[in-house]
Image (spheres, rainbow, N blue to C red):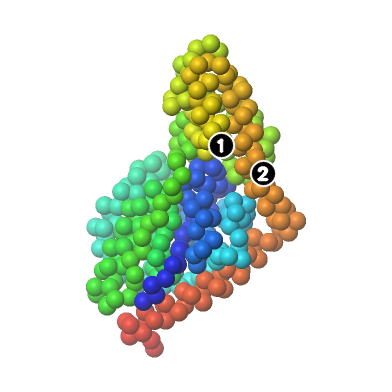
Amino acid sequence: MTANNRIVSGMRPTGPLHLGHYFGVLDNWVELHKDHQCFFFVADWHALTTEYADPTRIKGFVPGLVQDWVAAGLDPARCVMFQQSEVKEHAELSLLLSMITPVSWLERNPTYKDVRDQLDEAKDLSTFGFLGYPVLMASDILIYRPKWVPVGQDQLPHLELTREIARRANHLWGDFFPEPEAKLTRAPKLPGLDGRKMSKSYGNAISLGEDLDGVRAKIKPMLTCTKRVRLKDPGEPDECNLYPYHLLFTPQEKCLEIAKACREASIGCGECKKIMGDNLTAFLEPFQERRKAFDANPDLAWDILRDGNDRARAAARQVIGELREKLNFNF
Ligand code: TRP
């Protein structure tokens, strides 16, 4: 078994990433890839579990995801960025693990139930593939035998299932898979522009690639604190939609100053938004800068993936080869 500092994680290519994704998980990837061996992949087969009726759209989101990763600070030279469906060994392991995974484990998975109920009106998710989502995810992970899996909070039930499947495989087939552990980001949650969870479908998100004038225009109409009806009414930063943004983008000392001024009604919401907007756009500027490489070379994202696919495939083949030996499926 490889006891190591390996990291594996993936994202589904279903649209541009926004600040919620960044602070929910991507900042963690960026930190971790500096001193761990990381495998990050585009989970296109997982996108297919919900987009199966129109699979042709998925391809369009694949290079965009790689661009968002690089824009956010992931260096393709320091990690393996690849595409799930290009490493067929994930599917082979998924098939093998499906043999030992009780259906009842899948049916009681809370993420499964949540997503199915949320999307059920628009899509029929009573499919074998959707029920088996966590088995494929377990395979994505276990095939690299990592130590850590950096994911958002919502993925924890899936990761617990991965660990249970690993344990069952080890029990039935003999020790083979180390049990991977979740790694959550330490960043505070960033709400959407309207205070609800940030989500593309709520229209309350700032995407990582958004142009900076667009970002400012979105900040202007943000609701702040309902206590501040008039300029002279004192506000309460802890009840304000804008203040969590200050906590992330404005230096701590300035945050304290602003909070005090808000409670004393000596700063207006307009000015407060302007300060936050300046800091947020300054934060996003390097993202825009790194994205330029892709404008100059439209094939770059695919080139990065091609290189990563080869490296991931080599690692995955090794483990599948060992597993076949173990199962006496080495014909
Ligand atoms: N389920 C994850 C999500 O929706 C994506 C994913 C697929 C994943 N396979 C994975 C994440 C393996 C981590 C490890 O975000």
Q: Which residue occupies the foreground of this view, 193 or 135?
A: 193
Number of numbered discs present? 2
Question: Quarter-wise, where is residue 203 in the image?
Answer: top right
Q: Is residue 239 left or right of residue 214?
A: left
**At numbered mark 2, what does the secondary structure look like: helix, strand or loop?**
helix
- Please tell me whether residue 224 is drawn above or below residue 31 in the rendered image: above
Name the quarter where the N terminus is drawn: bottom left
Name the quarter where the C terminus is drawn: bottom left
Q: Is residue 66 left or right of residue 327?
A: right
Label 2 neighbour load within 10 Å: few <14, some 14-19, many 20+? some
Q: Residue at x 24, y 57 (%)?
A: 104
Q: Is residue 18 left or right of residue 169?
A: right
Q: Residue at x 27, y 78 (%)?
A: 174
| Distance between the alpha carbons at the discs numbered 2 and 1 | 17 Å
Q: Amino acid at mark 2?
A: Glu
Q: Which residue occupies the foreground of this view, 82 or 32?
A: 32
Q: Is residue 148 left or right of residue 286?
A: left
> Of the residues under marks 2 and 1, which one precedes in the sequence?
1
Residue 154 position, x and y percent, is: 38, 48
**At numbered mark 1, what does the secondary structure look like: helix, strand or loop?**
loop
- Please tell me whether residue 204 is drawn above or below residue 295 in the rendered image: above
Residue 202 position, x and y percent, is: 50, 35
Q: Residue at x 28, y 73 (%)?
A: 170
Residue 124 position, x and y percent, is: 39, 48
Residue lying furthest right:
296
Q: Which residue is mark 2?
A: 285
Question: Mark 2 or 1, which is nearer the eye?
Answer: 1
Q: Residue at x 54, y 55 (%)?
A: 30
Q: Which residue occupies the foreground of this view, 126 or 72?
A: 72
Q: Amino acid at mark 1?
A: Pro
Q: Which residue is mark 1?
A: 251
Can residue 267 be seen here? yes
